[in-house]
Amino acid sequence: MNDFNRSRRSPETGLPTQPDLVGLAKKWLEDQRKHWPDHPDPRLRDQRDDDTVAAEMASQFREGYLRGTGLSFSPARAPSPTTLGVAYLRFSCDNSNPRSLAQQLGNILSRACREEVFIPWETVFADAAISGTTAVRRGYQMAKQAIQDDKRLKVLLVDDIGRASRRDKEVLELGDLIEATDKRLVTASDGYDSEMPNNRFMLGHQGILNEWFVGQLREKVNRGMGDAFLRGRIIQNACLGYRLELVLDGNGKPILNSKGKVEKQRVVDEDQAQLVREIFHMYGDLGKGPEDIAKELNERRATGLRSWGRAQIVKILTRTLYIGVEHYRMTKMVRDRQTERVKVKHNPKEKWLERQVPEMRIIHQDLWDRVQKKRELASAVFKKRKTKPVFRNEVYPKRIFQPRCGHCGNSLWLGKSGKYATFHCTNGVESKRGCQLANYKAANIIEKVLLHLIHRQFAKHGWIELLVEEANHSLLQAAASTPPADTQKLSRQITQKEKACDRVLGMIETCSDGDVAKLQDRHQVLTEDLNALKAELTRLTAGSLAPPPGEISLEEVKAMLADLPTLLREATPEAAPYLAELFQNLEMFCAKEVERGAWRATFRFNATALMVYLSRRRHCPSTPLWEYLKQRDWTIGEVPAGQLIHFSETMAQQRDEARALHAQGVPMTELAKKYGVTWERVKGWLVEGYTEYRRLRYGRKRKEAG
């Protein structure tokens, strides 16, 4: 199998279009009849019109190209007295002239006739719109395979060496192949012939010239593209959220540029822009990960596609064009000369080109900042060095609450998911690191207890009035606070750290493999220091800013809290970010001294976070005031700080009811049917120590079976 078949390219990559193939076939018929009037090839003697014959030949070419093996000879089309050859044709890009293939074929057939070499249609190979800097070209690989395997084929003809390859190494390897198979390489335009004296020198010289030509061309293209970008020209296709429209003159006719092509402009596509906003909202506000977003978009066939993936979502979430800033030359493609594989590497920031396009803004700055902050938190999950433990289920929550173990600090994992999901500590169940949280706890019990706590706290008589009073008092105190702090020194330190990070990143791109690990560690330390300085700047700035004008209205707060029962009743993982801020530092401790299997939750109850969420939902005038208080980390003092978690209140009532009914003679099976639980659950309610006994018994059985 050749290199092209192992690649991930589409089989049609490089295949000339059907009209170009028909034109190529007509050129072959016309020239071969002129050069070989007496040749027995039946296509040259076909009495049908050339259009019909050429269409059949084009279909045969397409079939052999897609199959990757070319077309096989029939005895009538391969007369032994004639020397047979192979022709290879290529043009580089979509901007090239497709007629170039027919022109190259005409030159090759003329040279082949002078050399008394007949080129059958089956040995004409071509690639369209593929660069000669790569050898992974289907037509090129088939031409090499044919000249190597078929003993009847003696000569490989190309228009010039650059058509075969623009790489000096590949040109020399092609020369080695020709020499090893005792064949001949001939070019039609630049006069190369592998049977000439000093042909190796000429071949190497041509390869070097082609390399120089490619380098000069690449430099000119990059310079021109960069200049066009800085002048505001459109040099890339429109990404998701935008579309290209024709630029019309006063008469409604398209305007042509200096190259005679239609001028286009980029505009916001409102339908696609709404999808972009939805993707940002799902990631930044609803707690969904890139994989979940891609799955949802595929299920509903967003933009008519079912090929959404994680990489596409991440690319959308990091595209600065959505906030009106466009970058160019952020990455570069590097081709491995051994494997021909292309790798994308990131350029240091000092090499980026940037332009402001505020008219292209789609995403509000607040939403953008929330998304980028969450992405930084998500990337911290996979860092080797963590200043603070971060776990994936906290970044992309699957449940409403994501507690931690209060004994060892580990994030609690789902021991079982689905309808009967349970939380457990991986250290506690194996008694590692002195962790005492050894049992499992149903996730729905934790959620019901904590959600009921929220409802009970906000329903407490006079508590809402106290919340509003203390919030307004804190706003008045902040309004009379000291003037803004001097942050110039801190800003200079941040600038220096950013430059240091960019320098190290540039060194990583160019250094040898042995030094990469050290530089990566250095870059990580600098990034952590930079984040700490930015956090300090945010704290100082927030502390010195005056609050927005106005005060919080009690009637408005009561209207907002009318949505609270619905919010708590329909609580989903989408609400996890807001509820996580409501129960800050939520930790679980073993409370077996109270009751066997019980847990005790400790937290910092921050009602301000919930008020921000409710005010945003209703677009209340007091939203900036609540956001200001949340930014200052303010919360009311009289709040709960802990809660026993064993049974939900409903389950506790069922347990007490079941004990009373069982004492009256109702069997356990009837009680299980009445409450919709298993009889083992009922027996655990009735028989002291049964649950612990059952856990130990089946635990021993599992160990013995293992």
Image (cartoon, grey):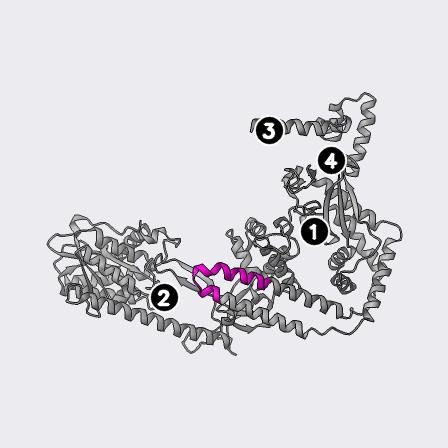
Q: Residue at x 85, y 64 (%)?
A: 473
Query: Which of the pair 62/580 is nearer the observer?
Result: 580
The residue that disc 1 covers is 575
Q: Amino acid at mark 1?
A: Ala
Q: CA distance from mark 4 to mark 2?
A: 70 Å
Q: Give yes or no for contact between labels 3 and 4 (Cβ–Cβ under 8 Å).
A: no
Mark 2 touches mark 3? (CB < 8 Å): no
How far apart, in angstroms, are the residues tagged by discs 3 and 1? 38 Å
- Whether residue 629 appears in this view of the structure is yes
**Residue 702, label in figure:** 3
Q: Magenta segment, which residues? A: 507-527
Location of residue 379 by image quarter? bottom right
* Residue located at (29% from left, 67% from top): 100
> Residue 40 vs residue 489: left or right?
left
Q: Residues within 10 Å of mark 4 (few under 14, many from 20)?
A: some
Name the residue tied to disc 4: 597
| Residue beneath disc 2 | 93
SS category of the residue bearing label 4? loop
Furthest residue in direction left, as rendered: 81
